[in-house]
């Protein structure tokens, strides 16, 4: 006598085929309509996010400990170098300050007070990373209940980190600009020439740089160390956010455009806190129309 | 029921560890894949159907939190769980070689699928680089973790089977 024998069960292989069919449909839906988990997001949000927050503090503790193994010598070396840099930067700062006053006057004149310091921002903690070693998508601990929406820009300290690609009630998924499938429309700050900045797993792992391409520089003015910012023609990124600095640039074989690598301004190795800009590019465009 | 709750907690713990602690303990931006160990182990210990459901659940978690195309990880993990389930007939708890090979094989297949479906279509043609710098390091790191994690999973499964057998015997 066995129990439960009367219960009907589908053979495993048909079940597999059926489920595969369902999820292939879901993938197509996700590609074409940009849908995501929907109600699953909210369920998962309430179960996992609090736990991730807790465990993550443990992880941070461990990595702090491992960082401490850096020898004193290295730190002293670095200190010396930094001292030099401080002196250099102080002089630079003084000149910049003078220029700043001038700029402010000019800006008032032109009433161009649209600045990235004027954007509304909110701070968030990075609570989880990974899923695979192939992509660079991370989670932050604020979601739609905190006013975060899809396509909001994420910055950390000195530069652009990424963009929100999906939100749940208490978390948001951020695709960083170093992710292999990320594309940002950028421009060189000094010449306003536009280019396309792409994340690249290979170059990021090897040299900590990302790629740029299609930079038109007919007068050959661009040099290493030039700052790249988000361009004003981008449809999702707000203009003027620092992406990074050119570390290498060379002419393409077509002799018109340049491509090369950029060192990102944000420190992706130690990403703990980020700022989400609550203003969206699409809203700004809608306002002016 | 007891089995479902236990496996749910195993998956949750592994997922949380993978996305937090092991990210902080990554070597050269490579972190181990604990979920593939869970999916693969329960696949060959329990058969196709259970492997498939566990794969589906793990994949869904990854899709919800880290996927960019919803459903991709789900299908891949589900199929991997199912295929591992086909090896149940030749699995013996005392033998360590087959489980290790299956887990490593699953991780390798996962890496190859990621490359073939997500990187190659975007004209990232340096396969040698991705094999040597992402796929193989991930396999090695996962293997190190597997040495500990697999025995925990094996013991949990044996314990569950013992309880199930005992309660089934009561009804004979």
Image (cartoon, grey):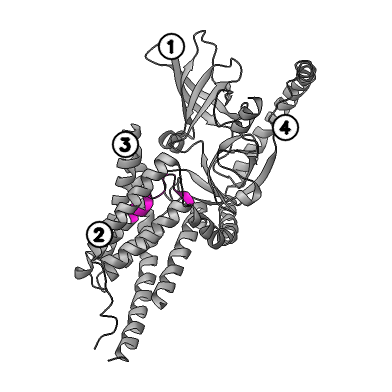
Question: Relative to A165, is B65 above or below?
Answer: below
Q: In this figure, which residue is indicated by the disc labeled 3?
A: B120
Q: Quadrant of residue A94?
A: top right
Provide the residue span drawn in magenta.
B65-77
Residue at 40% x, 41% y is: A31
Q: With B57 as the anchor, is B21 left or right in this view?
A: right
Asked whether the beta carbons under mark 2 and mark 3 sit within 8 Å of each other, the answer is no
Query: Rounded to the nearest whole Å, what is the CA distance between mark 2 and mark 3?
Result: 24 Å
Q: With A29 as the anchor, is B84 left or right in this view?
A: left
Q: Chain of mark 4?
A: A
Residue at 43% x, 11% y is: A256
Q: In this figure, which residue is indicated by the disc labeled 4?
A: A118
Secondary structure category for the residue under label 4: loop
- Of the numbered discs in the image, which one, if any, rests on residue B83? 2
Asked whether the beta carbons under mark 3 and mark 4 sit within 8 Å of each other, the answer is no
Query: Rounded to the nearest whole Å, what is the CA distance between mark 2 and mark 1?
Result: 51 Å
**Where is residue A169 shown, x and y percent of the image?**
58, 53
Taking depth in this image into account, of A287 and B125 the one nearest to the observer is: A287
**Where is residue A65 shown, x and y percent of the image?**
59, 55
**Where is residue A252 shown, x and y percent of the image?**
40, 16
- Of the numbered discs in the image, which one, if any, rests on residue B156? none
Q: Quadrant of residue A6?
A: bottom left
Q: Are marks 4 and 1 on the same chain?
A: yes
Query: Rounded to the nearest whole Å, what is the CA distance between mark 3 and mark 1?
Result: 27 Å
Question: Relative to B49, is A92 above or below?
Answer: above
Sequence-wise, which precedes: disc 2 or disc 3? Answer: 2
Q: Chain of mark 1?
A: A
The crowding category of the residue bearing disc 3, from other C-alpha atoms within 10 Å (few below 14, some 14 to 19, many at least 20), is: some
Residue at 47% x, 43% y is: A136
**Where is residue A61 shown, x and y percent of the image?**
60, 57
């Amino acid at each position: 006598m066995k129990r439960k024998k009367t219960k009907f069960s589908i053979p495993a292989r048909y079940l597999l085929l059926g489920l595969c069919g369902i999820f292939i449909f879901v993938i197509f839906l996700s590609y074409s309509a940009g849908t995501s988990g929907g109600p699953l997001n909210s369920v998962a949000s309430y179960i996992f996010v609090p736990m991730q927050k807790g465990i993550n503090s443990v992880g941070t503790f461990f990595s702090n400990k491992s960082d401490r193994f850096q020898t004193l010598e290295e730190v002293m070396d670095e200190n010396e170098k930094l001292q030099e840099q401080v002196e250099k930067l102080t002089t630079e700062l003084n000149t910049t300050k003078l220029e700043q006053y001038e700029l402010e006057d000019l800006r008032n004149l032109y009433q161009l007070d649209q600045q990235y310091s004027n954007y509304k921002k909110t701070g968030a903690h990075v609570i989880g990373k990974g899923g695979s070693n192939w992509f660079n998508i991370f989670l932050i601990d604020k979601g739609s209940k905190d006013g975060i929406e899809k396509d909001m820009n994420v910055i950390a300290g000195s530069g652009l980190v990424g963009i929100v690609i999906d939100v749940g009630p208490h978390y948001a998924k951020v695709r960083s600009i170093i992710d292999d499938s990320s594309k940002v429309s950028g421009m060189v700050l000094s010449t306003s020439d536009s280019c396309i900045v792409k994340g690249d797993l290979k170059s990021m792992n090897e040299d900590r740089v990302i790629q740029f391409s299609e930079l038109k520089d007919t007068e050959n003015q661009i040099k290493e160390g030039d700052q790249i910012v988000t361009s004003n023609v981008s449809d999702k990124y707000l203009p003027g956010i620092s992406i990074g600095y050119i570390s290498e640039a060379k002419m393409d074989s077509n002799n018109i455009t340049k491509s090369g690598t950029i060192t990102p301004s944000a420190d992706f190795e130690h990403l703990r806190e980020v700022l989400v800009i609550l203003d969206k590019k699409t809203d700004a465009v809608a306002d002016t129309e | 029921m007891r089995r479902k709750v236990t496996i749910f907690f195993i998956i949750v713990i592994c997922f949380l560890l993978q996305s937090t602690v092991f990210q902080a303990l990554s070597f050269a931006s490579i972190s181990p894949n604990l979920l593939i160990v869970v999916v693969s182990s329960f696949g060959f210990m329990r058969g196709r159907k259970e492997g498939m459901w566990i794969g589906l659940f793990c994949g869904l978690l990854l899709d919800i939190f880290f996927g960019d195309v919803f459903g991709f990880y789900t299908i891949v993990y589900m199929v991997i769980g199912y295929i591992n389930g086909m090896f149940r007939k030749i699995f013996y708890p005392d033998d360590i070689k087959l489980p290790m090979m299956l887990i490593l094989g699953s991780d390798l297949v996962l890496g190859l699928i990621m490359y073939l479906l997500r990187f190659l279509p975007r004209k990232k043609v340096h396969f040698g680089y991705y094999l040597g710098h992402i796929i193989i390091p991930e396999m090695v790191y996962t293997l190190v973790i597997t040495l500990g994690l697999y025995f925990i999973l094996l013991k949990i499964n044996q314990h569950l089977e013992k309880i199930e057998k005992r309660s089934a015997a009561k009804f004979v």
